[in-house]
Image (cartoon, coloured by chain):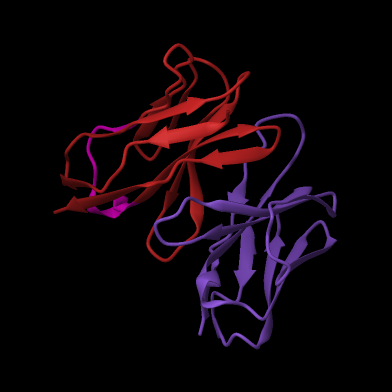
Chain colours: A red, B purple
Amino acid sequence: GNSVTQMEGPVTLSEEAFLTINCTYTATGYPSLFWYVQYPGEGLQLLLKATKADDKGSNKGFEATYRKETTSFHLEKGSVQVSDSAVYFCARSTLGRLYFGRGTQLTVWP
Amino acid sequence: ETGVTQTPRHLVMGMTNKKSLKCEQHLGHNAMYWYKQSAKKPLELMFVYSLEERVENNSVPSRFSPECPNSSHLFLHLHTLQPEDSALYLCASSQLSGGTDTQYFGPGTRLTVL
C-alpha cells in the first residue's frame, strides 16, 4: 500500500539538543519524500524534500536522507532552537498524490 | 502576493448557514487541492483539481461543494454543515509535470460550526 509511519510524539527537548524524528514509508516504485512543518496557527510549509535514493534534503539546519534499503527518511537536526517548536509531517508522493504521516509535535524548551 | 493564499482565515458559522472558502495560488501551478485537518486525525485529502477539472473526490459529503473557475482559484462552498465539520481547511497547489509534484500549502481557514 501507500503509507507513511512516523514516530509518535510529543517530543520535548531542551534548546541545543539533537533531534531525530523517524519516518518510514511503504510504496511501490520510487516515490518522492518530503518533510513539512506546521507552526502554531499556520498551514503546512515545505521543509525539505528528496526525489531519489541517497538524496539528502536539507534546510534551516534540518536534514533527511532518502534510504531506499530501509525505506526511511528520518529527520535530524544537530541543535534545535525554541523557534523549531512545531508539528512535523513526513510525506511521500506518487503520481501527484501526497500521503502524510500523522505528524509529530516537537516542543523545545529554553 | 506570493504563494498560496486563503480567505477567510477564521470562520464561525451555524449549521444552517451557507459560506464559501477561497483559495488563490500565485505560483502558476496547474493542480489544486482541498485538505481537511481535524484534531488528532491524519490530514484528509478532500478534492483534487487538475487543469480545472475535478479528478478526485474522496467520498466527501455533498454539503461540501468545490469549484475551480480557473487554474489560480479554488473555492469550497459550504452548506448545512455539522459540528464535526469544524476543522482547519487547507488548500494546496502543485505543478503536475511528472516530476516531484511538490505541493505548496496556504495558511488554512479555521472553521467552527456551531
List x then y, in percent, for residue B111. 53, 75
| Magenta region includes residue B39 | no
Question: Looking at the picture, does residue A102 appear above or below residue A63?
Answer: below
- Quarter of the picture holding the N terminus of chain B: bottom right
List x then y, in percent, for residue A74. 37, 28
| Magenta region includes residue A85 | yes
Residue A79 falls left or right of residue A110: right
List x then y, in percent, for residue B79. 69, 79
Residue at 42% across / 34% down in the picture?
A5
Which image quadrant is residue A95 in? top right
Q: Is residue A45 visible?
A: yes
Tell me which segment is drawn in magenta.
A75-86
Residue A91 falls left or right of residue A79: right
List x then y, in percent, for residue A108. 21, 50
Question: B68 or B56, which is in the foreground?
Answer: B56
Q: Is residue B28 visible?
A: no
How many numbered discs, if any? 0
Residue at 69% across / 55% down in the picture?
B59
